[in-house]
Image: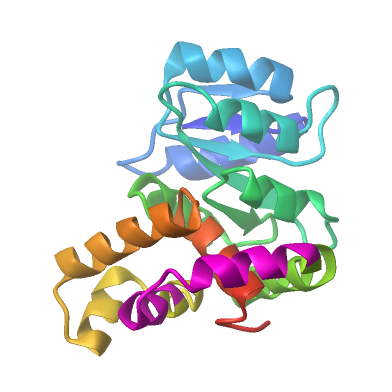
Amino acid sequence: MLLVDDDPLVRTGLSLILGSTDDITVVGEADDGDEAVPKVTAHAPDVVLMDIRMRRMNGLAATAAVVALPRPPKVLVLTTYDLDEYVFDALAAGASGFLLKEGSPQEIIDAVRVIASGEALLSPRATKKLIGHYVAVRTSPRRQQALAKLSTLSEREREIVTAVAQGRPNAHIAAELYLSEATVKTHITRTFAKVDVSNRVQLTIFAYEAGLVSP
């Protein structure tokens, strides 16, 4: 994975935390987005841990640039409780989730593993609350678009989108709806195409916009 943060002490701390595991390897560091994009190309990390506020290219622009690469890594955005609209914009741009810097070392490790596995990080509760806040405040003009897309989903697909937005993993969704995990994955992939999103976080944002779930 690649660490992107303009604070060298934060990078050092994260490197020590993540380097203490057997299954996570830090392949490089960058102090802003300008430096991050070529390093992603050079090192091909599976996950990028991306700060938001940095000198020169910030985390929002860097996330968009990284996700647009031919073989993009997963982007896990670092944030705090009081960050502004950049958090929502980074998620909408294709980040796979975000992590509070105040999280414990184990929470950081677990978050990286979740993102690396191809899932989106939809917990903790503050994360979903923040997504819901920005959907309510900033995207009211998009509600009609979301409702139009919602009309293309079957009742089963709506149930699954709602469960994804509530942060439930595929295994739990499958058990609740008496489906196989493979069937759940198929439904989720189909809904990605129908509502024009690329990951579970964006699907969660859509669920808030369409009113399937509320903050």
Question: Viewer-proximal residue, 116 or 155?
Answer: 155
- 79 shown above or below 167: above
Residue under the image location 60 percent in, 23 percent down: 29
Question: Viewer-proximal residue, 47 or 11?
Answer: 47
In the rendering, at what x and y percent does residue 142 appear?
72, 63
Give the side of residue 71 with respect to residue 210, left or right: left
Give the side of residue 137 with respect to residue 197, left or right: right
Residue 121 in sight in this render: no
Residue under the image location 39 percent in, 51 percent down: 113
- 75 shown above or below 42: below
Q: Quadrant of residue 85?
A: bottom right
- 98 shown above or below 169: above
Chief secondary structure of the magenta portion: helix
Q: Is residue 147 magenta?
A: yes
In the rendering, at what x and y percent does residue 173 appear?
30, 79
Residue 65 in sight in this render: yes
Question: Viewer-proximal residue, 72 or 109?
Answer: 72
Residue under the image location 61 percent in, 67 percent down: 146
Q: Which residues are magenta?
A: 141-161
In the rendering, at what x and y percent does residue 213 appear?
58, 82
- 174 shown above or below 70: below
In the rendering, at what x and y percent does residue 136 appear?
78, 73
Q: How is the image coloured?
A: rainbow
Q: Is residue 127 magenta?
A: no
Tell how many labels. 0
In what quadrant of the picture does the C terminus appear? bottom right
